[in-house]
Image (cartoon, helix red, strand yellow):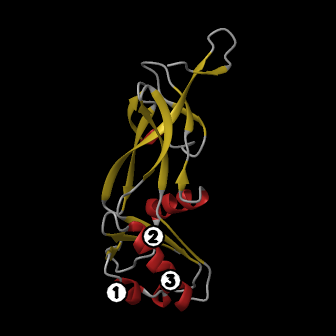
């Protein structure tokens, strides 16, 4: 089961440690708690450098290998001062489902850290993500910024839509051979 926990902004790491402590003492099943981050290229003094940024500030994801949601220690985690709430559904459940579950599994598959992907793009044509963790998310693209080497994707968690910028390496197709090469910007 996967859960999404909303906590105070800038208190994510503190909350993550507290949740790990509680789960380590209270559950016998496997669990993993992570604060999703992404690799971003930032330009400084004319040079691009890679930095780590939160993907969803104030949201922590939890994977728990338990059998029943009712056995999860929600009450104890709610007692952490930096915790606001668990993402929940109209039926009263908190275990992620549908698109939320797919998204949590995608982040888990990449160990909570989304590195730079490679993208093929020509002005006026559809963007194609050809390599990296964003592979398959072509349909979620809402903005392309070749100058800053970024694309913005739209994600939906619960009832909230978020646009998140990701660094990418733009590639071009060689018009004669069809081979891919790094775009020199």
Residue under numbered circle 2: 96
CB under 8 Å between discs 1 and 2: no
Q: Which of marks 2 and 3 is in front?
A: 3
Would you place residue 47 above or below residue 66 in this image?
above
Label 3: state its secondary structure: helix
- Going from N to C along the chain, the mark reached first, 1 or 2, is 1
Residue under numbered circle 1: 79
Q: Which residue is drawn at 39% across and 67% down?
A: 12
Q: Where is residue 53 in the image (x, y as percent from the top left)?
A: 43, 50
Q: How crowded is mark 2: few (under 14 residues within 10 Å), some or many (20 or more)?
A: many
Q: Which residue is drawn at 39% across and 29% down?
A: 145
Compute the Cα span from label 2 to label 3.
22 Å
Q: Which mark is residue 21?
A: 3
Q: Which sits in the foreground, 14 or 22?
A: 14
Q: Residue at x 50, y 43 (%)?
A: 137
Q: Position of residue 61 (x, y in %)?
A: 46, 68
Q: Which residue lies furthest to the top in this view?
A: 176
Label 1: state its secondary structure: loop
CB under 8 Å between discs 1 and 3: no
Compute the Cα span from label 1 to label 3.
13 Å
Q: Nearer the viewer, mark 1 or mark 3?
A: 3
Q: Position of residue 102 (x, y in %)?
A: 51, 60
Quadrant of the image occupied by residue 171: top right
Q: Which residue is drawn at 54% across and 59% down?
A: 112
Left or right: 95 in relation to 67: left
Label 2: state its secondary structure: loop
Q: Nearer the viewer, mark 1 or mark 2?
A: 1
Q: Where is residue 134 in the image (x, y as percent from the top left)?
A: 54, 44
Would you place residue 91 above or below residue 185 in this image?
below
């Amino acid at each position: 089961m996967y859960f999404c926990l909303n906590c105070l902004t800038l208190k994510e790491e503190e909350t993550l440690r507290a949740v790990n402590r509680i789960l380590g003492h209270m559950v016998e099943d496997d669990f993993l708690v992570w604060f999703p981050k992404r690799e971003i290229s930032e330009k400084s003094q004319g040079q691009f450098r890679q930095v780590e940024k939160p993907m969803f500030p104030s949201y922590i994801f939890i994977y728990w290998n338990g059998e029943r949601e009712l056995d999860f220690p929600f009450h104890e985690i709610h007692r952490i001062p930096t915790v606001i709430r668990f993402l929940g559904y109209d039926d009263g459940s908190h275990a992620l489902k549908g698109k939320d579950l797919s998204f949590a599994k995608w982040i888990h598959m990449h160990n909570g850290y989304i590195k730079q992907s490679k993208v093929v793009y020509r002005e006026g044509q559809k963007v194609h993500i050809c390599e990296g963790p964003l592979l398959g998310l072509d349909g979620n693209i809402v903005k392309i910024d070749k100058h800053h080497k970024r694309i913005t994707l739209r994600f939906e968690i619960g009832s909230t839509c978020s646009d998140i910028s990701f660094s990418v390496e733009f590639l071009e197709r060689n018009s004669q051979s069809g081979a891919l090469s790094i775009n020199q910007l």
